[in-house]
Image (spheres, rainbow, N blue to C red):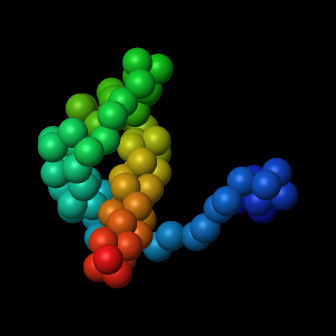
Amino acid sequence: MEDLKLAGLPMMWVWAHKDKWTRLLEVSGMIEFWKVYFNRNDGDLIHQLTHFPDVEHDDIMDSFVYTLLYTQQWATLNISLL
């Protein structure tokens, strides 16, 4: 993580307070209601999302879910300030 920070990428630590399945369910509405769009090149992510929990690796999906959770929290704060 330190190498990524040194490269100028915005990084932050996150701690899991819920299991992966629960976190995925929390953002599933964003995906179902077309709040998230996928690129054709997102094959690994799409595979992990559509085959979870029966995938060998789920790290891309987990990072994606944390990003959506963070974005959802940030967006809610902005909306409440309007």
Question: Which quadrant does the N terminus fall into?
Answer: bottom right
**Residue 7, position in %: x, y?**
82, 51
Mark yes or no: residue 9 visible. Answer: yes
Q: Residue at x 31, y 41 (%)?
A: 36
* Residue found at the very far right of the displayed protein: 6
Picture quadrant of residue 77? bottom left
The answer to whether 31 appears left or right of 13 in the picture is: left
**Residue 57, position in %: x, y?**
42, 38
Picture quadrant of residue 79? bottom left
Mark yes or no: residue 73 visible. Answer: no
* Residue found at the very far front of the displayed protein: 82
Q: Is residue 60 above or below residue 25?
A: above
Q: Residue at x 15, y 43 (%)?
A: 33
Q: Nearer the viewer, residue 16 or 73?
A: 73
Question: Which quadrant does the C terminus fall into?
Answer: bottom left
**Residue 66, position in %: x, y?**
41, 59
**Residue 54, position in %: x, y?**
25, 35
* Residue found at the very far bottom of the displayed protein: 81
Q: Residue at x 58, y 70 (%)?
A: 13
The total of numbered circles placed on residues is: 0
Q: Residue at x 29, y 37 (%)?
A: 49
The answer to whether 41 appears left or right of 25 in the picture is: right
Q: Nearer the viewer, residue 75 or 38?
A: 75
